[in-house]
Amino acid sequence: MRRFFFFLSACLLPWVSVAATRAEEEPPLEVWQEATLLHNEGLRLEESGRFDEAIQFYQRAIKRDPGLASPYNNLGNIYQEKRNWEEAEKYYKKAIRLAPQEASFHSNLGNLYYHQRDFNRAIEEYKIALKLKPDLALAHNNLGDAYLEKSHPRLALHHFQKALELNPALAVAYFNLGEFYRRQNQYSIATRNYHAALRLNSALAEAHFRLAKIYDDEYNTPLALKHYAAYLGRVNTGEYAEEARARIQQLS
């Protein structure tokens, strides 16, 4: 079961950078300007992986200006990363209430529902995101993934292909095409797509595992061993890791 998602964080808000300073003679900052500074510092901390500190700055930004939507969205991203679904949903919905036209907020809420395996609601949010921004490649990919889980292969294929049309470098879309063709028992096409995904992003460990399984079933032991080892080089625990170790031992 693959799951590769990328959260769409609100970018640095315009007006002033975090490091900006004011001369004493300048007028005091307005409320929205102070909130923007706090938001931008939170984003910097989030991007460096300092999530707990980022939460504090986003919450301070909200307290200073409750009408600023971006901190709510970014809090949703952090809480989704922490698997705190209830808090994530709360903040995403607040962001959407303030900025219902922002496609990335709907896409992120769709990711949350997907992770909860509520595919119907995920599909609904991805559709809203794409209605607002039809060229959002990642939303096409994720919508295709949700359709694949709902056993709507034609719709899934359409959105994977659309994602790659919009962004030919989107590795996860190639991976998902591999998943699509694997489920259709078209293993040679699946293999080509898994390799394409890895050429773009060698860190997609599950693509190695899928390739190893296909080569294993084809009695191509050298390639099966190669990809089982590559998978274990990136993932040490879990059901797939145990299977990979067992197969390496049996095939060696």
Image: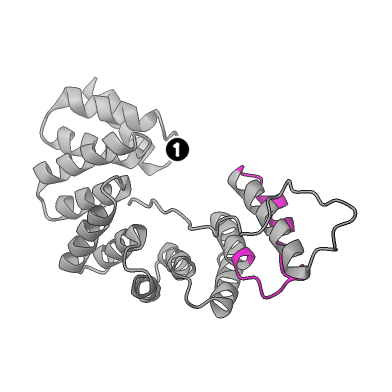
**Magenta span has 60?**
yes
* Residue span colored magenta: 48-71
Nearer to me, 89 or 94: 94
**Residue denoted by label 1:** 237
Nearer to me, 29 or 129: 29
Instruction: Residue 118: give x, y in percent of width and height.
Output: 40, 71
Q: Is residue 74 left or right of residue 60?
A: left
> Which residue is painted at 22% across and 37% down in the image?
195
Image vertical order of residue 143 relative to residue 120, above or below? above
> Which residue is painted at 46% across and 65% down in the image?
104
Q: Is residue 68 visible?
A: yes
- Category of crowding for the residue at label 1, using alpha-carbon neighbours closer than 10 angstroms: few (below 14), some (14–19), many (at least 20): few
Instruction: Residue 70: give x, y in percent of width and height.
Output: 60, 65
Image vertical order of residue 63 relative to residue 218, above or below? below
Which quarter of the image is occupied by the C terminus? top left
Image vertical order of residue 171 relative to residue 202, above or below? below
Secondary structure state at the residue bearing disc 1: loop
Instruction: Residue 144: give x, y in percent of width and height.
Output: 27, 63
The quarter of the displayed image where residue 246 is located: top left
Main SS, magenta residues: helix
The quarter of the displayed image where residue 159 is located: bottom left
Image vertical order of residue 144 relative to residue 124, above or below? above
**Magenta span has 159?**
no
Q: Is residue 45 left or right of residue 232?
A: right
Q: Is residue 73 left or right of residue 153?
A: right
